[in-house]
Amino acid sequence: MTRHDLAPRSTVLGGDPSAEPAAAPTSLLRRLNRRGFRLVMIADVLALSAISIGSMYVRFGFDWPDAPIRSYLLSFALAVTVFIASLYFGGLYEREPRLGAPPALPRAGQQTLAAGGLVALLSLGLSGVFRELGLGPTRALPFPIINLSILIVLGAVAVAVNRRLVHLVRTRREGPPRVLLVGEASELAVARQHLDDERVPARVVGKHSANAGLLEEVNRTEATDVMLLSPRWIEAIYADVLGELDRVGITVVLRITGRETLYGLERLREIGGMPFVLLRAQTMPRSRARFKRLFDIVLLVTVAPFWLPLVGLVALYQFAVAGRPLLFWQERVGIGGRSFQMVKFRTMVPDAEADGHGARLAEADDPRIIPACRWIRATRFDELPQLWNVIRGEMSLVGPRPERPELTTGFEHRIAGYDRRHEVPPGLTGLAQIHGRYHTDPEYKLGYDLQYLVNWSPLLDLQILLRTVWVVLARRI
């Protein structure tokens, strides 16, 4: 079976994204499935606000002190904003699949605890500001610890309850998840036995095997979820079909057998006694990608007093030893496979690729490098102008290194899954750069890049940046 066996021949999936479905039931089910949790943010704001105000009654009863009232009201607004931001960047407003959905309370508790810690730090930092502005008494914190503790505990419960209510409302309006099973006859029979139990909150609406069009079958059955019963089906649907299903809000999961669990897979879910993992067309959800962008901007602004003078000093040296042009602009492939102009200090002779060899990877002892500029490349100071690309949003501080379009095309034909590097903005440095060298094979580098995509966190970015500083100081190339 090939990807083309699953290609759509008509109807909603695989067609014009702007086209409206012909059948009303399709439109209603798909719209409800796509929109997910849009109203839950409003419910969270109302619940957290009510808990914040209620905590004041718990502390003071109905005799609120007059002096700090403005301080408390401003603190409530700030705390609720921080909590909502934490929930958002923690992925609690992403579309959550209903099939085997995990309990919301652990995730909600984790995010509200993180938000509570941030509010506590802000409360300490803003206490002096509030006193200067006359918004509170001399010794009062803008958000008292007692009130904050109540908000963390009850807030986690409220957030989890809101998601449970949304889940119940969606189930009442749409019915249980409509599952399309994909597998061979023996696999389909076993899975059907597990899911046909009336206690299982799912309904099997069809079975798919071998060479019929998967997208057409999803359209025909109005499935909201697709369950692959064997890993061998992944290659058939990745990445075109999986991306099309993800675009219209269809969840795709992979059933895991005992052998696959030995690989150390995490975040397993279960339905009808069958463990499975969620498959995504993109590894990094939108909320995490936006938080990564925010993290880049905050870090750039914070360390600007260090990198701005460094850029100036390197520019003066570069101009003195190499003359003009000072900068070198080159087309690279960025997020989504889109090209952009990456900038760096010129460390090679002019027209370095005019020798007839065309585009090729640089080497440690590349003769095209200007001798007086070798230390700039060794310390990677030639990459400093790419901070401008980061500011423009074309790059990130950490991520897969961008390649030339000519090289990217060759790698994509030679290395399966190479295009997955383009799911996030390219970076100044990355996991592959702190572990690899110039001669490291691109396929090995891809392994580091994909590991980074799956395990991304702000802490991982900080670790990579600090390791990069060590690599620069040690002049490891």
Image (spheres, grey):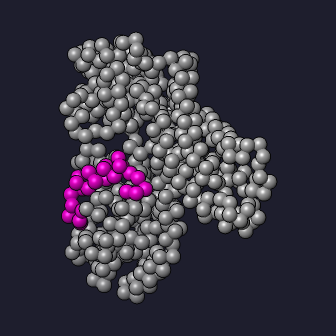
Quarter in which the C terminus is drawn = bottom left
Q: Residue 326, percent across and down?
A: 43, 78
Q: Nearer the viewer, residue 420 or 292?
A: 292
Please count the marks in the image: 0
Query: What residue is shown at x 63% (from left), y 35% (from top)?
Result: 43
Residue 324 versus residue 458 in the image, above or below: below
Query: What residue is shown at x 39% (from left), y 20% (from top)?
Result: 179
> In the figure, residue 466 lies in which quadrant?
bottom left
Residue 247 versus residue 83 in the image, above or below: above
Query: What residue is shown at x 47% (from left), y 49% (from top)?
Result: 289
Can residue 212 be seen at all in this image of the molecule? no
Q: Nearer the viewer, residue 19 or 133?
A: 133
Q: Residue 244, percent across and down?
A: 42, 33
Can residue 50 be seen at all in this image of the molecule? yes
Q: Nearer the viewer, residue 195 or 34?
A: 195
Q: Per the image, is 15 magenta?
A: no
Q: Residue 92, percent across and down?
A: 51, 40
The segment highlighted magenta reads 436-460
Quarter in which the N terminus is drawn = top left
Q: Nearer the viewer, residue 453 or 8?
A: 453
Q: Residue 282, percent across and down?
A: 40, 42
Query: What residue is shown at x 77% (from left), y 42% (from top)?
Result: 62
